[in-house]
Amino acid sequence: MTVVGPFGLSVRDQALEADVQAGLTAVEEGLLEATKSAVPFITEAAQHLVRAGGKRFRPLLVMLSARFGDPYAPGVVPSAVVVELTHLATLYHDDVMDDAEVRRGVASANARWGNSVAVLTGDFLFARASHILADLGPEAVRVQAEAFERLVTGQILETAGPQDGRDPVDHYLDVLGGKTGSLVAVSCRFGAMMSGADETVVDVLTQYGERLGVAFQLADDVLDIASDSHESGKTPGTDLREGIATLPVLRLRERAARLGLAEDLALCELLDSDLTDDARHAEALRLLRAHPALDQARRDTVRYAEEARAALAPLPDGPAKSALVELCDAVVHRAG
């Protein structure tokens, strides 16, 4: 058994492992090339998060999805660079919106250089992704544009909150489908498209990516509460501090409204208070870590991961399909 990719994904096929590793190495080189500028400061800022590392979850999905066609087709690696550049750009912007200080175990770009530089660096990465995308053809441009529209729509819906009468959990899951599911789905779609896979295979992998992306973000929600900064690479409880209600908090509020238990209501009141206060923030984290709402959020993560696994059923068995199935298990494992 060998290990490749995020979360220690195990790959039992030596040929697949070698090809995936070679592909990810080429993606890494492509990321560094795409983030170079004639202005040294822009290069430094643009490569800040590239050099900090990361799971390269989306490029891995491109590589594995390409195994259902010609994995050596010329568009595979560039499309993986496009999705990772897009993802990185959103991180620069997210950290500004969240006022985050740490990303991937290093100072966030906004903490190091200020919000304006961070936002503009994100824009620079979007521009470089678009430049690469233009060489992949009009269909690729259309797919990426639609995904980016969904991504931004999801972010706006999160900011606006649910409309009156809308279930907050349903609203939040729709938000995640846009913010995270869309780009993960495109990763799988690009891998299959660029490899020349059959259209039915492209559709199956796109559906898989959508569900896996939501499961991946739900696992992040759990980790934001349950992990320490060493494990997650960012400051725990960032969303709590910013007043962003992720699934564990929404499940708590749902339970409080349904059962009316004093301890649940008290915790909701604490979460609604000023959590920029370090003592309140620490107490909120401690109570949420011990609350049944966190376990419910874990079960929700498992459900989406199982839906992703089920979506793969029509695909032919083989090492690539097995690796995609194992990614479902890995996402669940992250959530504990």
Image: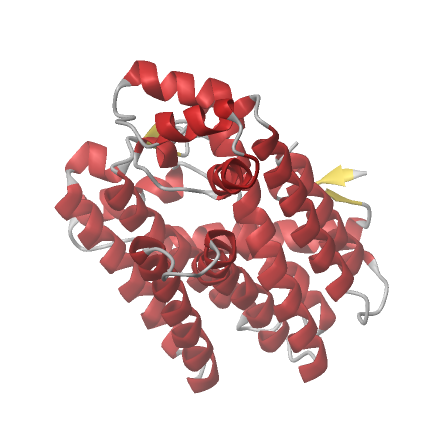
Total marks in image: 0
Q: Is residue 129 visible?
A: yes
Q: Quadrant of residue 219?
A: top right
Going 65% across and 76% down the picture, which residue do you hit? 202
Q: Position of residue 57 (x, y in %)?
A: 55, 50
Pick the residue in front: 45 or 157.
Answer: 157
Q: Is residue 198 visible?
A: no
- From the top left corner, tell me how far across and down residue 63 is, in percent: 62, 60
Q: Residue furthest bottom?
A: 138
Up-down relation of residue 217 to residue 318 (above or below)? above
Above or below: residue 326 compared with residue 177: above
Quarter of the figure with residue 238 = top left
Which quadrant: the N terminus? top right
The residue located at (73%, 53%) in the rendering is: 306
Vertical arrangement, residue 296 with respect to residue 321, above or below: above
Q: Depth check: 120 or 183 in front?
A: 183
Expressed as whole percent of the image width and height from the top left, the position of residue 35 reads 31, 53
Which residue appears at 84% of the width and 69% of the height? 316
Snapshot colouring? secondary structure
Looking at this view, name the residue that lies furthest to the right: 317
Location of the C terminus by quadrant is: top right
Outermost residue on the top side: it is 279
| In-front residue for pair 284/332 | 284
Query: In this image, 157 relative to 274: left or right?
Result: right
Which residue is at a point 77% across and 54% down the rendered structure image? 15
- Is residue 88 left or right of 250 when viewed as pictured? left
Q: Quadrant of residue 82?
A: bottom left
Along the horizontal axis of the image, is 336 left or right of 55? right
Asked if residue 88 lies left or right of residue 25, the reply is left
